[in-house]
Every structure is written in C-alpha cells, then in structure tokens.
C-alpha cells in the first residue's frame, strides 16, 4: 500500500475556466472564471479554540496562507471549529484585507467583523450577492441540514448553510456539513446542473444520531 502523503497544490493568480483543489477537510480552493474562492478555510493544526489542545489534524495543510494565490471570496458554512478557524481567518485578513469578500450565513457577521474583516456579506438561505468587480458570478446561500455551536451558550444562534456559486459557464456547489435532506432537490432544481459539487462524507459515531447532520459513508 502506498503511504499517504501531502502534495503541494499547483495554483495560479488567474484561471479562466474552472479548477478545484482540495486542501483538506472542508477547505477547497476553487479557481472559477477569473475568481478565486476558498471554502471553510482551516490552516491551523487543531480544530479548537486553543492550539495546545483539541482535535489535531493527521497531516499538515498542503500550503500556507502565504502560498495561496489571490483570494477574492471566502465561503463559511457554519460556526464549528473545524469549519470556522480564528487563526486562518486572521491570517487571510492580514494578507488580503478589504480586497477579500467574506460570505457568511446569518448570525456570523459580528464574529467575523470582530476578527478585523471589513468586507463581510451576511446572507439568509436563498439570498445572493457577488464579489465587487465580478458581477457575472453569483454567490447564493443555500440550505443544509446541520446545526451550529461555538461556545457553551450559543447553540444554534447562527445559521448553517451550503453555497451555490453560479458563473456564466460553470457552476459549483459546496455542501459544508450536512445530512441528506430534500433541500438538495430544490437546490438542484433552481441552480443545477453543477459542474462540480464538494460534498462531505464522514464516518461519524454514533451513526443513528450523526447521520441527521452529516453525510454517512
């Protein structure tokens, strides 16, 4: 059996068509019709409020924030630590500042703004917006079946979502974290077909409970 290894991604500052690179867990770099998109970025070693304890990744990220190409948009699906990482948000903001647009579901704008991010767009399900200067690509906050929690006191205080990215020639779907629900049929009916869909598959335990909010393998 070949050993598992991490390969550095090939990236560029501009890709006219569509290229997608998986950077680990739910972090995907999408180069689509001249716009570079990052989903649920996590470049830290742990999915935790502390880097000295908590769930640690088996392999390091394939690149650093400094090695990324220009990023135009970041999509955040929900508030869990393995999808919304404070260190990664801070690093991206330090490098790209106000040139980077953040798309977040309802209830997360204040958190992202407190991290110093200026260009934040908070959307409810089925609402849409775009990146300034790229009006031909539409970002739609679409439903998912999940939940949110970041502290002991904020159960489901913010929304969770998937994202549909609609360009003139290509379409991309990012599921975030989700169990299967009828909303996928509605998303497909409204915005499909998609050229590529990033859908998580996980072995979560106990299965009877976790499959309600995660896609089972």
Image (spheres, rainbow, N blue to C red):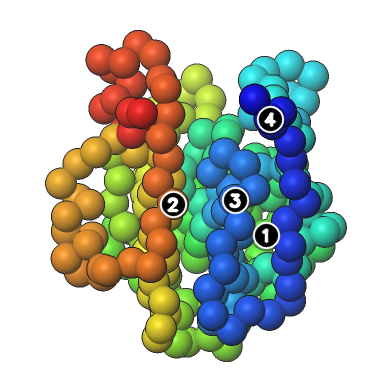
The residue carrying pointer 1 sits among few (fewer than 14), some (14 to 19) or many (20 or more) residues within 10 Å by Cα, namely many
Q: Earlier in the sequence, mark 2 or mark 4?
A: 4
Residue 211 position in % (x across, y down): 29, 25
Per the model, the C-alpha gap separating discs 3 and 4 is: 20 Å
Per the model, the C-alpha gap separating discs 2 and 1 is: 26 Å
The furthest residue to the front: 1
- Residue at 74% x, 62% y: name it: 10
Residue where numbered disc 2 is placed: 198
Query: Of discs 2 and 1, which sits in the foreground?
Result: 2
Query: Of discs 3 and 4, which sits in the foreground?
Result: 4
Per the model, the C-alpha gap separating discs 2 and 4 is: 25 Å
Q: Earlier in the sequence, mark 1 or mark 3?
A: 3
- Could you tell me which quadrant the N terminus lies in? top right
The residue carrying pointer 2 sits among few (fewer than 14), some (14 to 19) or many (20 or more) residues within 10 Å by Cα, namely some
Query: Which numbered marker is on residue 164?
Result: none
Q: Earlier in the sequence, mark 2 or mark 1?
A: 1
Residue where numbered disc 1 is placed: 117
Query: Of discs 4 and 1, which sits in the foreground?
Result: 4
Residue where numbered disc 4 is placed: 2
Residue where numbered disc 3 is placed: 22
In the rendered structure, are the residues bearing label 3 and label 2 in contact, judged by CB atoms less than 8 Å apart? yes
Residue 210 position in % (x across, y down): 33, 21
Q: Earlier in the sequence, mark 4 or mark 1?
A: 4
Residue 144 position in % (x across, y down): 30, 46
In the image, is residue 198 above or below residue 211? below
Residue 216 position in % (x across, y down): 33, 28
Q: How many marks?
A: 4
- Could you tell me which quadrant the C terminus lies in? top left
- Residue at 64% x, 48% y: name it: 23
């Amino acid at each position: 059996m070949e050993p598992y290894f991490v390969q550095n991604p090939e990236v560029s500052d501009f890709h006219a068509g569509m290229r997608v690179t998986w950077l680990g867990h739910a972090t995907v770099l999408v180069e689509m019709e001249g716009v570079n998109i990052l989903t649920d970025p996590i470049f830290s070693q742990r999915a935790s409020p502390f880097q000295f304890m908590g769930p640690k990744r088996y392999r390091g990220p394939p690149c650093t924030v400094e090695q990324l190409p220009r990023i135009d948009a970041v999509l955040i699906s929900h508030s869990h630590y393995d999808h919304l990482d404070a260190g990664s948000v801070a690093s991206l903001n330090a490098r790209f500042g106000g040139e980077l647009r953040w798309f977040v579901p309802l209830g997360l704008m204040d958190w992202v703004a407190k991290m110093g991010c200026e260009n934040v767009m908070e959307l409810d399900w089925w609402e849409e917006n775009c990146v300034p200067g790229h009006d031909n690509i539409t970002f739609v906050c679409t439903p998912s079946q999940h939940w949110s929690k970041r502290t002991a006191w904020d159960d489901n205080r913010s929304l969770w979502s998937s994202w549909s990215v609609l360009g003139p020639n290509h379409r991309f779907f990012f599921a975030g974290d989700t169990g299967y629900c009828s909303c996928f049929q509605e998303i497909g009916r409204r915005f499909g077909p998609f050229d590529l869909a990033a859908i998580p598959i996980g072995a979560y335990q106990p299965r009877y409970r976790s499959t309600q909010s995660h896609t089972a393998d």
